Image: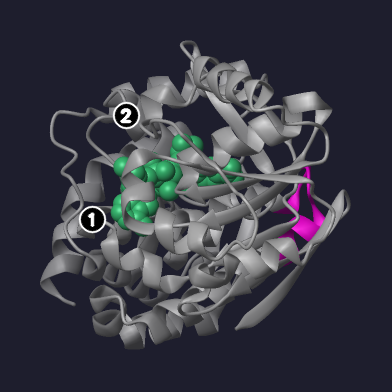
Amino acid sequence: MQRIPVRAPSGNYLVCCGRGICARVGPLVEGLGDADRIFLLSSPRVWARWGQTVAKSFRGAAPEILFDDRESSKNLGTVERICRALAKAGADRRTLLVAIGGGVVGDVAGFVAASYQRGVGLVHVPTTLLAQIDSAIGGKTGVNLPEGKNLVGAFYQPQLVVSDPETLRTLSARQYRAGLYEAIKYGVLGDAGLFRFVEHRMPELLRRDSTAVGRVVARCVRIKAEIVRRDERERGLRESLNLGHTIGHALEAATNYRRFLHGEAVGWGMLGATLISVGLGRLDEREAGRIARLIARVGPLPPLRGISPGRLLRIMRRDKKSRASRIGWVMPRGIGRVELQVAVPEALVAKALRELPRLYEQARERP
Ligand SMILES: NC(=O)c1ccc[n+]([C@@H]2O[C@H](COP(=O)([O-])OP(=O)(O)OC[C@H]3O[C@@H](n4cnc5c(N)ncnc54)[C@H](O)[C@@H]3O)[C@@H](O)[C@H]2O)c1
Ligand SMILES: [Zn+2]
């Protein structure tokens, strides 16, 4: 088992990673020592696969509260239902919630933990690749409003994260691959060694070999932990995690969040940022080629068909307006290095968007 410390200004905790560790959640949580009552929060789907393994590891009672983990259920209604279930069960301030699931379960349960009785204990047991390398670490929690995603939330750090690569075996192939794009993102933004590892071990990673996956997860967690330590509230450095997300978010919005999984949209977004960076003369063509080929090897991305560059630009402009600032792009400068707050002429963005499908096809043909 690897123990990776996260030292966030608002709280320190460990991320424990290891094969089979989800059968040891109970002792790890009970070892934290200060909770009177423990509740397990999960979704029916995740619970059917992993619930019993986790539940059986507790010595004392740890009843479950299950809720739907579709993105459309990540809302205040679900938060209210969970809070009421807690209140009815007599949960008080010395309660601890264990969130078992992907990013939706983690974001909802995290927000419940931040707000129920003004804050109760929280442990994450992330069961998707995206949750293990991203959403379970760093303390961002929240839910959606009809007006937009993640508009209501809180920064709230867990007391512990327990991450088991074995849980990823039951994930759909598409969900798993979507997480791999975010893993590549960490390589590009800050760890050339991780990028090389993914290049060399792609076949094992695609097979979900737990040793290879475990190494990638641990590397990504370390990078995120370091970023969160230095910039918990996203005032600067944490922005680097948004590599590929400017175009990615626009793609998700343009298709009403139906065509792309988040990681897939980020895959396209990183290809776009790579093209733009070459266009700005900030990224060497050879490195750009490596990034494009690695993204292409993860598997097929849903096509961009029918999404015009003009539409994407309008969405990006709208997002920028709502933040009352210009778009500050995260630009790859080389594998393992990014530059923040780069201004990019719109004509160059449009050109990159037009060229994206061709770049992707080329990269798929030359693995
Ligand atoms: N808080 C953050 O910092 C942060 C960061 C990134 C993303 N997010 C949020 O995370 C959410 C996406 O999370 P996600 O990608 O983990 O997807 P998800 O939570 O939507 O889960 C995807 C699907 O996989 C299922 N699932 C989960 N674990 C499984 C397992 N082990 N076996 C079988 N099925 C399993 C779920 O039931 C669901 O159907 C979004 O709402 C996004 O906004 C939050
Ligand atoms: Zn993301």
Look at 14% across and 28% down and name the residue there.
306
Look at 79% across and 62% down and name the residue there.
32
Look at 25% across and 49% down and name the residue there.
356
Does 52 sit above or below residue 144? below
Task: Identify the residue position indicated by label 1 in the image.
Answer: 172
Residue 79 placed where, x, y %? 57, 22
| Residue type indicated by callout 2 | Tyr
Q: Residue 338 carries which label?
A: none
Dot 1, how many residues are within 10 Å of its Cα: few (below 14), some (14-19), or many (20+)? few
Task: Identify the residue position indicated by label 2 in the image.
Answer: 257
Number of dots carrying numbers? 2
Residue 119 placed where, x, y %? 80, 33
Which of these two is toward me, 12 or 331?
12
Residue 128 placed where, x, y %? 41, 56
Look at 48% across and 45% down and name the residue there.
103
Compute the Cα span from label 2 to label 1. 18 Å
Q: Does the residue labelled 1 lie within 8 Å of ligand 1?
A: yes
**Label 2 element class:** loop
Magenta-drawn stretch contains 232? yes
Which of these two is toward me, 174 or 58?
58
Q: Mark 2 vs mark 1: give the one in front.
A: 1
Image quadrant in which you'd find residue 309: top left
Image quadrant in which you'd find residue 181: bottom left
Q: In the image, which residues are magenta?
A: 225-237
Residue 321 placed where, x, y %? 59, 17
* Quarter that holds the N terminus: bottom right
Q: Are marks 2 and 1 in contact (CB under 8 Å)?
A: no
